């Protein structure tokens, strides 16, 4: 089954906008940046708080992406090694459990 990037993006946005997730976003961003809602309400510090929030969120996403990409690469490498040595390990490459 092939899933297009547009379909994956639409499904992700739909799940993000669900009533279970959307109310959690503002407190999460406040927690992520270590700031308070009062600081966002203050007109003088609002631009700086917004930039701080955006930078912290982008760094979090970058770190999260890096970790899970590394885990995926590691799992793929282990799978490739197991497939390459499947004859020696006594595993049939196309064997399915009944």
Image (spheres, rainbow, N blue to C red):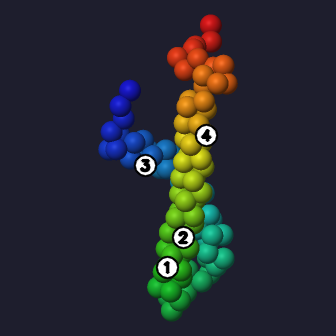
Q: Which mark is residue 13?
A: 3
Marks 4/1: CA–CA distance: 42 Å
In the image, residue 54 sits, relative to residue 89, either above or below, namely below
Marks 3/1: CA–CA distance: 22 Å
Q: Label 2 neighbourhood size at 10 Å, few (<14), some (14-19), many (20+)?
A: few
Marks 2/3: CA–CA distance: 20 Å
Check disc 2 and report the residue beneath it: 59
Marks 2/1: CA–CA distance: 14 Å
Check disc 1 and report the residue beneath it: 50
Q: Is residue 7 or residue 78 the one in the foreground? A: 78
Check disc 4 and report the residue beneath it: 78
Name the residue: 38% across, 47% down. 9
Nearer-N-terminus badge (2/1) = 1
Image location of residue 47, percent across then percent down: 47, 85
Name the residue: 60% across, 83% down. 39
Position of the C terminus by quadrant: top right
Q: Tell whether 17 sits left or right of 79.
A: left
Q: Is residue 18 or residue 70 the one in the foreground? A: 70
Nearer-N-terminus badge (4/1) = 1
- Label 1 SS: helix
């Amino acid at each position: 089954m092939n899933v297009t990037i547009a379909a994956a993006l639409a499904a992700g946005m739909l799940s993000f906008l669900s009533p279970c997730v959307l109310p959690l976003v503002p407190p999460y961003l406040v927690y992520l940046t270590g700031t308070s809602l009062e600081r966002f309400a203050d007109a003088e510090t609002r631009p700086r708080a917004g930039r701080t929030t955006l930078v912290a969120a982008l760094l979090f996403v970058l770190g999260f992406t890096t970790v899970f990409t590394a885990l995926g690469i590691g799992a793929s490498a282990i799978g490739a090694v197991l497939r390459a040595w499947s004859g020696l390990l006594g595993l049939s490459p196309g064997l399915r459990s009944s």
